[in-house]
Image: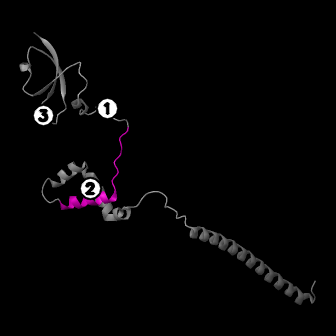
């Protein structure tokens, strides 16, 4: 009696499962690998959920590395002394040698130390009551400085007018 069965083959434990339909009288015709018989009418098993989704997302997410992470990786890279240790580190972390080159230049220029634990964006404003008082006093100081500047200009103009009038008084002998 010939039957049609769906068989999932896995040649290595880390390899994705492959499905194939085999028409056999017994399972001895299947190559000598681990085989699992799957019934077509059965509900999906848990082992199917382990298969990675073949869909690729439209937008890749760019990785961002913190300054502390960069410094830690550079310290580990500096400790690599034997052949192949650096490549192993890069593979383990999923990095390229160009990352190390760029990060070493940043470390040499002191950029990494200056960036450590700094958050981007505006600085938070402390909303304490003293800050409001200080802001009001600074406004008042600015207003008073403007008034002072105007009065100094007026005083200088008055001095010049008095000097001109004194010159006229001496030349004509009388005050107009």
User: Residue 55 got which mark?
Assistant: 1
- Is residue 94 within the magenta segment? no
**Which label's residue is closer to the chain start, 1 or 2?**
1
- Is residue 60 within the magenta segment? yes
| Crowding at mark 3 (Cα within 10 Å: few <14, some 14-19, many 20+) | few
Seen at 23% across and 31% down, the residue is 46
**Residue 59 figure quarter:** top left
Which secondary structure, mark 3? loop
34 in relation to 95, above or below:
above
State the extent of the magenta-drawn residues as a range: 59-79
| Crowding at mark 2 (Cα within 10 Å: few <14, some 14-19, many 20+) | some
User: Could you tell me what secondary structure mostly forms the magenta stretch?
Assistant: helix
Name the spot of residue 19 as percent of width and height, x first. 19, 24
Lateral position of residue 166 relative to residue 83, left or right: right
| Residue corresponding to mark 2 | 100
Seen at 89% across and 88% down, the residue is 169
Q: CA distance from mark 3 to mark 1?
A: 23 Å
| Residue corresponding to mark 3 | 12
């Amino acid at each position: 009696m010939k039957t049609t069965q769906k068989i999932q083959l896995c040649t290595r434990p880390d390899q994705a499962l492959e499905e194939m339909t085999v028409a056999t009288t017994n399972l001895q015709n299947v190559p000598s690998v681990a085989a699992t018989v799957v019934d077509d009418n059965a509900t999906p098993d848990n082992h199917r959920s382990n298969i990675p989704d073949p869909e690729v997302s439209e937008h890749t997410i760019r990785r961002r590395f913190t300054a502390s992470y960069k410094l830690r990786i550079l310290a580990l890279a500096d400790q690599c002394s034997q052949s192949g240790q650096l490549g192993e580190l890069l593979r383990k972390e999923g990095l390229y040698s160009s990352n190390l080159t760029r990060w070493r230049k940043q470390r040499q220029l002191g950029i990494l130390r200056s960036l450590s634990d700094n958050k981007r964006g505006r600085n938070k404003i402390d909303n304490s009551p003293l800050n409001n008082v200080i802001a009001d006093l600074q406004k008042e100081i600015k207003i008073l400085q403007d008034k002072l500047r105007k009065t100094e200009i007026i005083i200088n103009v008055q001095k010049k007018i008095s000097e001109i009038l004194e010159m006229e008084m001496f030349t004509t002998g009388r005050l107009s």
